Amino acid sequence: MHKILACSLVSLGLSACNNPTDDSPSKIINTEGYQTKHTSANPYIFEYNDIVYNLKADQPSDTAHLKFKNLLKKMPSNDNDLDILKTKRKVLIHLGCLKEAYAFTEKILAKSNDSKLQEVQCVFLRKMRKNADEIKECYEKTAHSYLKEINLIPKAALRYQYALWGYHAAMFHAGNIEYIDKLQEIIDYHNIEDHKRTYQQMYENILNPSVFQKRLDAIPYNPDCQ
């Protein structure tokens, strides 16, 4: 299960077809793990992609684990290189090093606003069983991030509704239960069946804690990661 999940837990740039604001951890990190094998000018990204490609092709998980650890050791300590930071973060997630992945995500967020990455931080905190106040603060920060994004998107754009959903969902997770009605309004707004069904599924995932918990339990996590 962890092997399959790790292939999807890679980066939070979710596409519309993957329900970008669905808070299922199995979809939290996008489809990058399922991409076809390709080359990269950055040798570390190339090696990472090669490991993921082989993992998808039924490479033994312990072999992949060792390769990820070796790759991490080889990567330079360069906090100014965004590609290096992102690749390290992906490797750490595969290794179950969520505390370390959280720290690298913070470095990435310091360089650019990314609502989806910020949202994943809250999932990491929940997986690591952090206190309720810290999780609440994280979701409030996520809502603020989505709000900044919303202000830059034309209302007619499809992405506007996704960002609006992200904002309302984050506010709901932060303890503002009245925002569940705002989520229902977004469902009612859509008259295209596929769009309505997508939002309805996300709505049900939010309301059903057992669905979220099942996916949360599937995220690899090693609290003593070295």
Image (cartoon, grey):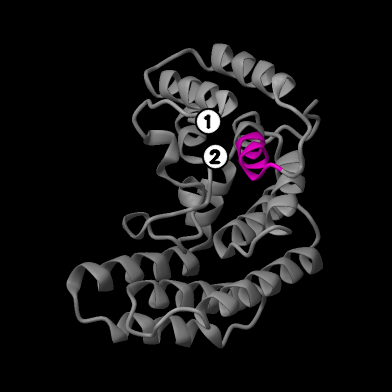
SS label for mark 2: loop
Q: How crowded is mark 2: few (under 14 residues within 10 Å), some or many (20 or more)?
A: some
Q: Residue 39 appears at what percent x and percent y?
A: 42, 25
Say which residue appears at 41% left-offset and 77% top-offset. 160
Q: Which mark is residue 2?
A: 1
Considering the whole magenta stretch, tell me its main secondary structure.
helix
- The amino acid type, in three-letter code, at marker 2 is Ala
Say which residue appears at 53% left-offset and 17% top-offset. 61
Name the N-terminal-most of marks 1 and 2.
1
Q: Residue 191 appears at what percent x and percent y?
A: 20, 81
Separation (CA) of disc 1 from disc 2? 6 Å
Within the magenta stretch, is there residue 86? yes
- Give the magenta-colored segment's residue range: 81-89
Q: Residue 208 appears at what percent x and percent y?
A: 48, 64
Dot 2 corresponds to which residue? 218
Asked if disc 1 and disc 2 are in contact, CB closer than 8 Å, the reply is: yes
